[in-house]
Image (spheres, grey):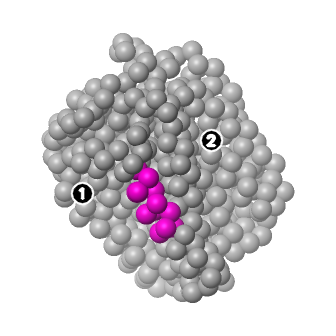
Amino acid sequence: MSPRQRTGVLLLASVTSLMCALDTLVVSTALTTIRRDLGGGVEALEWTVNAYNLTLAVLLVPAAALGDRFGRRRIFTGGLVVFTLASAACALAPDVPTLVVARAVQGVGAAAVTALALTLVGAAYPPEQRGRALGVLEGVTGLAVLAGPGLGGVVTDVVGWEAIFWLNVPIGLVVVPLVLLVVPESRGGDTRLDTPGVVLLAAGALALVWALTRGNVAGWGSLEVLGSLVAAAALAVTFVLRQRRASEPLLPGRLLRAPGFVAGNLATVGLFVSVFGGVFFYSQLLAVGLGFSPLQAGLGLMAWTSALFVLGPVGGMLADRIGNRPPLVIGLVLTALGTAWVAMAAASPDLSYVDLVPGFLVSSVGGSLAMPAAANAVLGGLGPADVGKAAGVNSTLRELGGVLGLALLVAVFAPLGGYADAADFLAGFVPTMAVCAALTAAGAVAGLWVPRRPRVSVGAQGCRA
């Protein structure tokens, strides 16, 4: 692939990743307005976020596998079309159930886009250049983190929350034909799809997330929740047994032996717990805890999101230059410290926005360093045929880790806090963010096992064009 083709792939992958990331973040500052217009409490708000993130998380590995089997560009383009149509359906939703269903369909399209964007970039660049390319991808995605809350606030205040979904439609209409023109078709090394593995993985992830999101509503000892947990465990065991005997498994054993794959993925989970927890709770902290309007909350969150667009590429270059472990571990430690700072500031009886800014900034810098290093640790040293599967697993754990983390954080918040007034909200927010900081710190510990320099894994296969 020529340098010009690589640049085109990186540009289009970045733009589409930006679009999918925006859809989580622009919604964050509209949550209070959606709750007022369509009704519902914290569980309903959680599902407007999780309906999207759950289907996205469950389908990332299957989407990557479908791309390897039937063509990465083909599945990528199909995902863009589904995402665009579902965005229009979200904008037209008259009630919360309809919005939740439309958000779930959005997640189906976003799964194909997100998994294949990372796969296309990882396959286009050789291992020694992947860190910088992934840093650019994360940096452009960081533009969504930077602009998303403010954009959501502006659009919600000026036009209405529905308009945040209409934004995706013209982007999709422009990008789809460009992908068909610019991105070359490619496939992975597999000659057939492990359909039973896809079904087992998707069903197991769905059962686990369902149990966690329904725990506070149905009761943690209820038949529904316990049954879902048992089903998740049984499906996970069955999936592992299936992978051992499948001729072309979704998760080959060689990936588990690849340096950095397991530790990098565990670190990714810790990082994205803080990302999803921040997206969900920080906007509400500003809106409910401090009485900010959607516009003010969006602008206020820029202190938390500001560094990623600027420092994401820097984090990728550092990973290429000094290795993955230092920026990954340091970044996660900074993210945990920043989250803990916000929790301590919110515990003050005289809380002001200025008190939150240092914690927001430290978390932002930490995430900027850790994101590209985590992705590079997972993909480093893999051959082109394995990049698709590894990228699918990493993307899945980003989303699934975030969804599971958010479900856990909501489970902490619900019995302790509420929305009656600022004091009621803060009573639940402070311990929730303390738990979030601890989970992120656990990700930093996992990062210590990431090799400083990726080594080419044994058994990497070629890629079919």
What residue is pinned by disc 2? Answer: 109
Which residue is more in the foreground, 120 or 18? Answer: 120
Query: Separation of disc 1 and disc 2 at Cα?
Result: 31 Å
Is 82 on the left-hand or right-hand side of 263?
Answer: right
Mark 1 Cα shell of 10 Å, populated few (<14), some (14-19), many (≥20): many
The residue lying furthest to the right in this view is: 94
- Where 250 falls versus 336 (above or below)? above
Residue 367, image x, y percentages: 35, 53
- Where 287 falls versus 430 (above or below)? above
Is 434 on the left-hand or right-hand side of 279?
Answer: left
When asked about the image quadrant of residue 131, the answer is: top left
What residue is pinned by disc 1? Answer: 447
Is 268 on the left-hand or right-hand side of 177?
Answer: left
How would you classify the magenta stretch by its main secondary structure?
helix
Q: Is residue 61 visible?
A: yes
Which residue is more in the foreground, 56 or 84? Answer: 56
Is residue 237 part of the magenta span, yes or no?
yes
Q: Which mark is residue 154?
A: none
Look at label 2 and name its amino acid.
Gly
Span colored in magenta: 232-243
Mark 2 Cα shell of 10 Å, populated few (<14), some (14-19), many (≥20): many
- Where 24 falls versus 137 (above or below)? below
